[in-house]
Amino acid sequence: MTTGISAETHALIKEAARVAAHEAVIEVLEKIGIEPDEHKEVQKDMIWMRKWRIMSERLGSRVLMTIATILSAGVVALVWQHITGTK
């Protein structure tokens, strides 16, 4: 190695960093209310929330298109009534 430390020391540092990172992740998960052993359930929850988000985005765009269509039809009807003189 070019850093001047032995391979054994490098391996020990790497393992210590891995353990520290693992413990930090577990601590953060616990602080936000997620049990680290239940990560599969959390993944399912995230998938479910993503499906709901996508569905609500699609619904929102459909609602806007429906409103635009109704308004356009109303304007066209008003213009047609004005042109033909009907009431």
Image: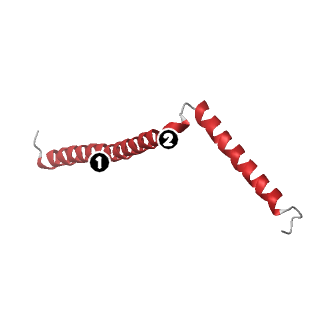
Instruction: Check disc 1 and give the amino acid type.
Output: Met
Mark earlier in primary sequence (2, 1): 2
Residue 39 location, x and y as percent?
50, 41
Mark 2: give few (<14), some (14-19) or many (20+) Cα within 10 Å.
Answer: few
Q: Is residue 41 left or right of residue 15?
A: left
What kind of residue is marked 2? His
Q: Which mark is residue 65?
A: 1
Q: Position of residue 12 (x, y in %)?
A: 78, 53
- Direction from residue 28 to residue 57 in the image, left or right: left
Measured as percent of width and height from the top left, residue 80 is found at 16, 49
Q: Residue at x 34, y 45 (%)?
A: 55
Q: Quadrant of residue 85?
A: top left
The residues tagged by marks 2 and 1 sit, at their Cα atoms, a distance apart of 39 Å
**x 89%, y 64%: residue:** 4
Q: Is residue 6 above or below residue 75?
A: below
Which residue is the site of mark 2? 39
- Quadrant in the picture for the N terminus: bottom right
User: Seen in the image, is 74 located left or right of residue 24?
Assistant: left
